[in-house]
Image: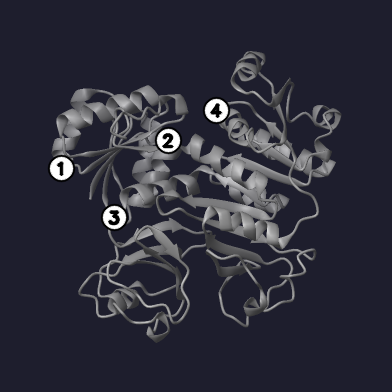
Amino acid sequence: MNIIIIGAGNVGSTIAGVLSNSHNVLMIETDSHKAEIARSGLNVSVLQENGVNPKVIEDAIGRHAADVLIAAMPYDENNLFSCIVAKNAKNSIRTVSKIRNPDFIKVQGDGAYFGTDMIVSPELSTSKKLSKLAVLENAVDYNDIEKLGLAVAIFLVTDIHRGFAGHAMVDIRIPDNCTIMSVYRKGKVILYKEMTEVHAGDFLCVLGTPDSISEFNEMMGYTREAKEITIIGGGIVGSNVARMLENEKLYLKMIEHNPEQCKKLVRDVDNTLVINADGVDPEVLRSENTGRADVVILATDSDEKNLLGSLVSKDLGAQKIISRYSKREYEDVFAVTGIMSIVGYHRLIANEIMKTLISDEKALMKMNHDEETLFMVKINKDSRIAGMPLGDLQFPEGSRAVCIMRDGTAIFPRLDTRLEKEDNLLLYTYETKLHKIEKLFGIRIMDV
């Protein structure tokens, strides 16, 4: 595809990095410094112009023969305007707008978004992920696959999880409608095998329906149920997290430094105690008994403040700490501190773009490790494997069939489950040679 990305900031550059490996990408950026960074660091063409200028947009679409335009500038109104201009210039073009403030997301009567075909909202996606991790005591990561009604969660196994630690996979009873895809152990990926023994310190990567993921969390057991949650930062992300959690019968406390934002929060949230204070000041956190909280969520707009607040909360004894970050380099910084539940823009954006733009045989999401992917393959009517049981198929090394989507229903297969025509088969792969999957299914997989 020929793709135009307007804006070479953190979001635009992340999107370009995901798509430029297999698509022809042109970036439009008005700032000379950002344009030069994109030109030297990414496999893209760069046009240093104003991406809100209608003439610039129309000329770029014509010269680039663009199939898709992605507006990823700092301001929501500019992004929507650019998408409207692009649609007027070429009706068949698909437009994607980055939206920070959910108030700008308007759905029309026919279900379409106002001003754009698709939305990428890092703030809203971050809020959903933070709120979900808050109520899954054992989970350190969580990703929705909303269009399939599925989710992927990563659970940490500790010594208290006696039904897991020291047991072989085959002996672990898990809820219906989910499956363990792999084990992460000391930085290595171990594919599911029945006799693999689970150790304390392992991370289990689980695919399932959202309800079964919650059941899996409860089945593991926990020392303390998440009931008291402190949110530090009351901006777009923090306020949305509070609204999403207010129906969970929790005690919610939010600490926000800006007095004007606190006044707005008091009007916008119903069951959250709003405190006007510096949420990363150790004395404030100590006086607010943050160490007693079951969950502390760091949701400010500053990576530095989120890191500091995480460390202070950890030192005070908070049960679980979840933090957002926007700069890619902070992922490694958080890893050194031992804060495991972190939500980064670049992973969220990469997965949102993959789910939005990649069609047919597609990667549903990038997982936690390189070369680890969840694919979906359609079994067409002429496929030679239609009607065959999964146990008779020789899947390439590093791959495993984890779910079948049939008539909108998720089926977690056994070896005797037979594939039917029009099934969509979900494959989990790690370091798998894609050409071997293509040969098995007789299809062409687009590499992301």
Nearer-the-camera pick, 16 or 299? 299
Residue identifier under label 1: 65
Image coordinates of residue 277 in percent, x first then y, are 74, 21
In front of the other: label 2 or label 4?
4
Q: State the residue at coordinates (62%, 23%).
A: 269
In front of the other: label 1 or label 2?
1
| Label 3 element class | loop
Measured in 3D between alpha carbons, the distance from the residue under mark 1 to the one under mark 3, in whole angstroms, is: 19 Å
Q: Amino acid at mark 4?
A: Ile
Q: State the residue at coordinates (17%, 28%).
A: 88
Eyeballing the image, is 99 above or below 14? Answer: above
| Label 2 element class | loop
Nearer-the-camera pick, 42 or 91? 91
Measured in 3D between alpha carbons, the distance from the residue under mark 1 to the one under mark 2, in whole angstroms, is: 24 Å
Nearer-the-camera pick, 406 or 263? 406
Q: Earlier in the sequence, mark 2 or mark 4?
A: 2
Tag of residue 359: 3
Tell me if 332 is positioned left or right of 117 in this view.
right
Residue identifier under label 4: 236
Residue identifier under label 2: 9
